[in-house]
C-alpha cells in the first residue's frame, strides 16, 4: 500500500486542533491519527500524523479493468438535475438581481422571454432520454416561475402521462404569488420548494420591492410560506438567504427562520458586480467570517440538543469531509447538472445563460457532449494555478466557476473575498463534523444519511456485483468491471450487510498491522469509492435533514 505524500495544514477552532492533508483534502481531528499521544503540540502532532500516514498510506482507488483514467476522474454519463427557466419576467424589482449582471442582461432582460409549451415538452422528451436511469430532478426557475404556474402544471402533467415516475420536481420562488388553489398540485407531485427570503422583515425589505405597488415583500412572501407549509407538510421547504453588504445579518436570520420551524436553510453571498454598493467585498470579509462563526456556534449547540436541520454551506462541506474523497469541482454544472433556457438552449448554469462558451446544445438538436467534457477538464481544481497551493482545494474545489467568471473574468480564478469566506466556512464545517463524531454520532448520521458512514453502519455489496479471486469486480447489470487491490478486495468481501464499519476496520487493522483509527479512515474512503462505482450500498439512516438537497 503506497503512501501518498503531501503536507498537512493545521488550524484551531474553539480551542481544538485539526489537520487537513492538502494532497487529498482529507481532514481529521488532532490526535485521530495518533491516538497514543497525550495532548501533543501541534508541530509534534503533525509529525506523528505524517509518520502514521507514511506507514499506512491511503488505499489505492479502484481502477477500471481496461486502459483508461481512474473512475473518479471520469465525468457523469447522463443528466441528473436541470434548472428549467420558464420565464424571465418577475413580479419584483429588487435592487440586486443576477439577471442584471452585465454579461447576462441580454439573455435575461433584453429578450424577456417565456418558455413556450411545445419547447417545454421538447425539454421533457430530451431529459427522459438524456437523464439518469434512476430519475431526473427538474427545478422550475425564473424570473418568477409562479407567473407561469399554468404552464408548469401542463408540463408536469405531460411528463407524468408520458414518462411516469421518471422525474422529481422542485421550485425556486420568491413566494409572493403562492396561493391555496396551487397547493393540491404541489402536494400531488411532492414538490420541494426553495423560498427566497433574506432575513427578518426589515432586512428582507431593504433590497427587495414590488414592481407595481408599495408594501412589504417579506409580509406577503412569509405569510405564503407559513400557509404553504401548514397545507403541504409532505413538500420539503427550504429558505435561501442571499446576503449583501446591507443585509449581512446572518445569525439573526438563521435564528428567525429556525424559530419558525424551517429545517433547511442556505446562506449564499449574492452575485453583483464588484463595484456595486451591495457587494460583500474584502472590507466586509472580517464581518462575514465573524457572523459565520456565530452561526456555526448556534448550529452546533442545536445539533448537540438533537435538533437535526440542514444549514449550508456547512452541511455541503461536511458531506465532502465525511466521504473523504477529493472534490475536484465545486459543482457538476454542464455535466450532470444543466440549465435549459426559455428558448430550449442548454447551458452549463443559469448564471452563464447566453454565453457562447457555455452553450451545450439545445433540446431540439441534442446535447454537445464534447463541449461538456471540455468544461469538465477546464474546471478541475487540480489544474488551476491559483488553487494549486491551497490546503482546502479538494474541499472547496475552486468555488463557483460562474461567480469567478463574472467577478474576475476567469472561470478558474476565485476572488480573494470568496476565498477568505469559503476557507473560514470550511474550517467551521470541519469543527462541526468532528464535534458530532465525538459527541453526537447519531445526529451526524441523521443529518448526512448515506453520505456518512457511521461506526455501526453495515454496508452491503450490491446483488449484481461479482468479486473474483483475482480482485476483478464485475457489475452484471451495466457490464462495468474494476480491478481492486488486495486491501480493497478484502474490504468489499466484508461488505456483506453483517459486518459494521468498526468490524471491517478492526479486521483490516489486524490483517495489515496498522492503527485502527487510520484503518477506519481509509475504510470509509474506499467504501465511498465503491458506492460511487455502484458496488455497495450504504445505510440511509433516519436522514432528517439530508432530503433537502434543493438546487
Image (cartoon, rainbow, N blue to C red):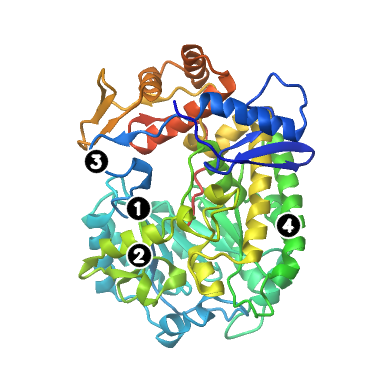
Measured Cα–Cα span from mark 1 to mark 3: 27 Å
The mark lying in front, picked from 1 and 2, is 1
| Residue indicated by mark 1 | 80
Q: Residue 389: give x, y in percent of width and height.
A: 58, 53
The mark lying in front, picked from 2 and 4, is 4
Residue 159 seen in render: yes
Among the two numbered marks 3 and 4 on one chain, the one whose residue lies closer to the N terminus: 3
Residue drawn 70% across and 30% down?
Answer: 45
Crowd rating for badge 2 (residues with CA inside 10 Å; few <14, some 14–19, many 20+)? some
| Residue indicated by mark 3 | 67
Residue drawn 56% across and 40% down?
Answer: 6
Seen from the viewer's position, the closer of residues 296 and 5 is 5
Give residue 473's mark: none
The mark lying in front, picked from 2 and 3, is 3
Seen from the viewer's position, the closer of residues 203 and 72 is 72
Disc 3, SS: loop
Measured Cα–Cα span from mark 2 to mark 4: 42 Å
Among the two numbered marks 1 and 2 on one chain, the one whose residue lies closer to the N terminus: 1
Seen from the viewer's position, the closer of residues 495 and 61 is 61
Disc 1, SS: loop
Residue 432 seen in render: no
- Left or right: 489, with 331 as reference point: left
The mark lying in front, picked from 1 and 3, is 3
Disc 4, SS: helix
| Residue indicated by mark 2 | 153
Residue 524, placed above or below residue 420: above
Measured Cα–Cα span from mark 1 to mark 4: 33 Å
Amino acid at each position: 500500500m503506497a503512501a501518498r505524500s503531501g503536507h498537512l495544514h493545521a488550524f484551531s477552532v474553539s480551542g481544538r486542533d485539526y489537520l487537513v492533508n492538502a494532497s487529498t483534502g482529507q481532514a481529521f481531528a488532532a490526535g485521530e491519527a495518533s491516538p497514543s499521544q497525550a495532548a501533543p503540540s501541534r508541530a509534534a502532532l503533525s509529525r506523528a500524523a505524517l509518520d502514521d500516514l507514511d506507514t499506512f498510506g491511503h488505499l489505492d482507488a479502484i481502477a477500471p479493468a481496461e486502459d483508461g483514467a481512474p473512475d473518479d476522474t471520469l465525468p457523469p454519463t447522463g443528466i441528473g438535475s436541470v434548472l428549467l427557466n420558464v420565464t424571465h419576467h418577475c413580479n419584483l424589482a429588487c435592487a440586486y438581481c443576477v439577471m442584471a449582471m452585465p454579461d447576462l442582461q441580454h439573455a435575461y432582460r433584453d429578450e424577456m422571454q417565456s418558455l413556450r409549451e411545445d419547447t417545454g415538452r421538447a425539454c421533457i422528451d430530451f431529459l427522459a432520454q438524456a437523464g439518469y436511469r434512476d430519475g431526473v430532478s427538474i427545478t422550475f426557475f425564473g424570473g418568477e416561475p409562479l407567473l407561469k404556474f399554468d404552464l408548469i402544471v401542463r408540463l408536469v402533467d405531460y411528463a407524468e402521462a408520458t414518462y411516469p415516475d421518471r422525474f422529481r420536481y422542485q421550485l425556486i420562488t420568491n413566494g409572493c404569488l403562492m396561493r391555496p388553489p396551487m397547493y393540491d398540485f404541489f402536494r400531488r407531485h411532492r414538490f420541494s420548494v426553495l423560498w427566497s427570503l433574506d432575513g427578518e422583515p426589515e432586512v428582507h425589505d431593504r433590497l427587495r420591492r414590488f414592481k407595481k405597488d408599495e408594501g412589504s415583500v417579506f409580509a406577503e412572501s412569509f405569510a405564503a410560506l407559513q400557509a404553504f407549509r401548514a397545507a403541504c407538510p409532505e413538500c420539503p421547504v427550504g429558505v435561501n438567504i442571499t446576503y449583501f453588504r446591507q443585509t449581512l445579518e446572518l445569525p439573526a436570520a438563521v435564528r428567525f427562520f429556525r424559530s419558525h420551524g424551517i429545517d433547511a436553510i442556505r446562506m449564499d453571498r449574492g452575485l453583483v458586480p464588484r463595484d456595486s454598493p451591495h457587494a460583500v467585498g474584502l472590507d466586509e470579509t472580517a464581518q462575514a467570517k465573524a457572523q459565520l462563526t456565530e452561526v456555526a456556534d448556534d448550529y452546533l449547540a442545536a445539533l448537540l440538543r438533537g435538533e437535526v436541520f440542514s444549514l449550508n454551506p456547512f452541511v455541503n462541506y461536511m458531506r465532502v469531509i465525511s466521504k473523504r474523497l477529493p472534490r475536484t469541482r465545486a459543482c457538476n454544472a454542464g455535466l450532470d447538472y444543466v440549465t435549459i433556457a426559455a428558448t430550449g438552449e442548454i447551458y452549463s448554469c443559469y448564471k452563464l445563460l447566453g454565453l457562447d462558451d457555455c452553450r451545450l446544445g439545445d433540446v431540439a438538436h441534442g446535447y454537445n457532449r464534447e463541449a461538456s467534457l471540455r468544461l469538465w477538464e477546464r474546471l478541475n481544481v487540480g489544474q488551476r494555478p491559483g488553487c494549486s497551493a491551497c490546503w482546502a482545494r479538494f474541499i472547496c474545489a475552486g468555488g463557483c466557476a460562474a461567480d469567478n467568471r463574472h467577478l474576475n473574468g476567469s472561470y478558474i480564478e476565485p476572488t480573494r473575498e470568496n476565498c477568505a469566506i469559503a476557507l473560514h466556512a470550511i474550517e467551521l464545517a470541519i469543527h462541526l463534523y468532528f464535534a458530532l463524531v465525538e459527541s453526537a454520532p447519531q445526529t451526524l448520521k441523521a443529518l448526512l444519511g448515506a453520505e456518512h458512514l457511521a461506526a455501526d453502519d453495515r454496508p452491503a455489496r450490491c446483488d449484481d456485483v461479482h468479486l473474483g479471486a483475482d480482485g476483478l469486480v464485475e457489475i452484471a447489470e451495466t457490464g462495468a468491471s474494476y480491478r481492486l487491490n488486495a486491501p480493497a478486495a478484502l474490504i468489499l468481501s466484508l461488505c456483506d450487510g453483517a459486518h459494521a464499519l468498526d468490524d471491517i476496520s478492526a479486521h483490516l487493522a489486524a490483517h495489515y498491522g496498522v492503527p485502527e483509527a487510520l484503518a477506519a479512515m481509509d475504510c470509509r474512503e474506499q467504501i465511498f469509492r465503491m458506492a460511487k462505482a455502484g458496488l455497495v450500498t450504504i445505510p440511509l439512516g433516519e436522514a432528517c435533514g439530508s432530503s433537502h438537497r434543493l438546487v
